[in-house]
Image: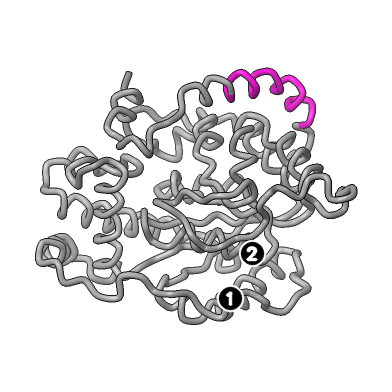
Amino acid sequence: MYKNMEESKRVENFKRNSSLEDFLNEINNDLWETEKNLLKIAEPDYPLIFVMGSLRSGSTLMMQWLVNLGFACPTNMMSRFYKTPIIASKIQLLLTDERYNYRNELRDFNSEIDFSSENGKTKGALSPNEFWYFWRRFLPFKELDYLPTSELLEKVDIDTFRAEFAGIVDVYQKPFALKGMILNYNIDFLDKIFEKAIFIYTKRDPLANIESALKAREKQLGSIEEWYSFKIPEYTELKKLNPYEQVAGQIYHINKAIKSGLKNVAEHKKMTVIYEEFCENPKVFYDELKEKLRVQGYEMENEYYGADSFEITRKSVDDTNIIEAYKKIYENGKNV
């Protein structure tokens, strides 16, 4: 009932396809018995790259950049097999990898990353997908998208969760990058259960971040009044504020939680990426990532061949409501 109420708030272009949802559920259940037989590897042999950050902080651009550099990721194709991602990885390689190309039979899949998206949604079979259905298989969240790490350690099927990732990287034989923002408040949980991992924390100028999140509310839900993205622990209190202060508080608290969560993560397992600095010179962050992966036993052989720069969106914000909300919420936390 709760999820159906949330779905009803979306504008028409963003509503789920119920026929597709039912068919995917059927297919995933059909394949699950086979997937269980593949859950044999206890630990991933290659690092996982978790992209963390607030909504509208540049996380989708970061994912597209990582895929363009050759890292594996959950794709729009894989996302349809959220209960059987190891099988999905095998099918994807069979259909798209050049090693298995026979006389160009299956050249219809779009393998080019054009660095465009709509509220985090990309186009193309091999473009990165947020993979939230996969995450929600394991996370026992209810109204709020949060539980204390102690509860997650008790309630999550960690063995299966870890084995799914291990099976995926075994298929691709390379690091696997994905958005982990559903656990922005539980970085310590992921850090505990994955020895080989890197947390990329994407940050953005807060005024631009607030404006972008408000635009996303309006575009996807038809109004800035409706809550957009995960319901964080502060959700109940933030809902009492006006929309501008809600969003400012939402972004403020998420960044605060991530900053706190990363304090106890080893240096070779974390990096902070400022969106504006990344757009100006992504190679700097490539070199940092390359070194952190090397420390974890993975050597990137190629020199940087990605984009020299990206366009910075929302370079300035002059909306008085946004500026006032920022001042009110951030007055005691300007360094977050």
Q: Which coloring applies here?
A: one colour
Secondary structure mostly seen in the magenta stretch: helix
- Tell me which residue sits at (31%, 43%) in the image: 220
- Tell me which residue sits at (50%, 28%) in the image: 155
Q: Residue 168, labelled with which disc?
A: none
Look at the picture and state if 303 lies above or below 313.
Answer: below
- Tell me which residue sits at (68%, 59%) in the image: 71
Amino acid residing under circle 2: Asn
Which of the image's four quarters has the C terminus? bottom left
Q: Residue 307, labelled with which disc?
A: 1
Q: Which of marks 1 and 2 is nearer the N terminus?
A: 2
Amino acid residing under circle 1: Ala
Q: How crowded is mark 1: few (under 14 residues within 10 Å), some or many (20 or more)?
A: few
- Tell me which residue sits at (15%, 63%) in the image: 322
Q: In which quarter of the image is residue 251?
A: bottom left
Q: Do the residues labelled 1 and 2 touch (CB within 8 Å)?
A: yes
Residue 34 in the magenta stretch? The answer is yes
Q: In which quarter of the image is residue 182?
A: top left
Q: How far apart are marks 1 and 2 (CA)?
A: 9 Å
Picture coordinates of residue 175 (x, y %)?
70, 56
Residue placed most toward the observer, 69 or 324? 69
Which of the image's four quarters has the N terminus? top left
Q: Is mark 2 on a helix, strand or loop?
A: helix
From which residue to which does the magenta span run? 24-38
Residue 50 in the magenta stretch? The answer is no
Q: Is 26 placed left or right of 42 in the picture?
A: left
Residue placed most toward the observer, 311 or 41? 311
Q: For mark 2, what is the residue?
A: 68
Q: Residues within 10 Å of mark 2 (few under 14, many from 20)?
A: some
Picture coordinates of residue 167 (x, y %)?
74, 40
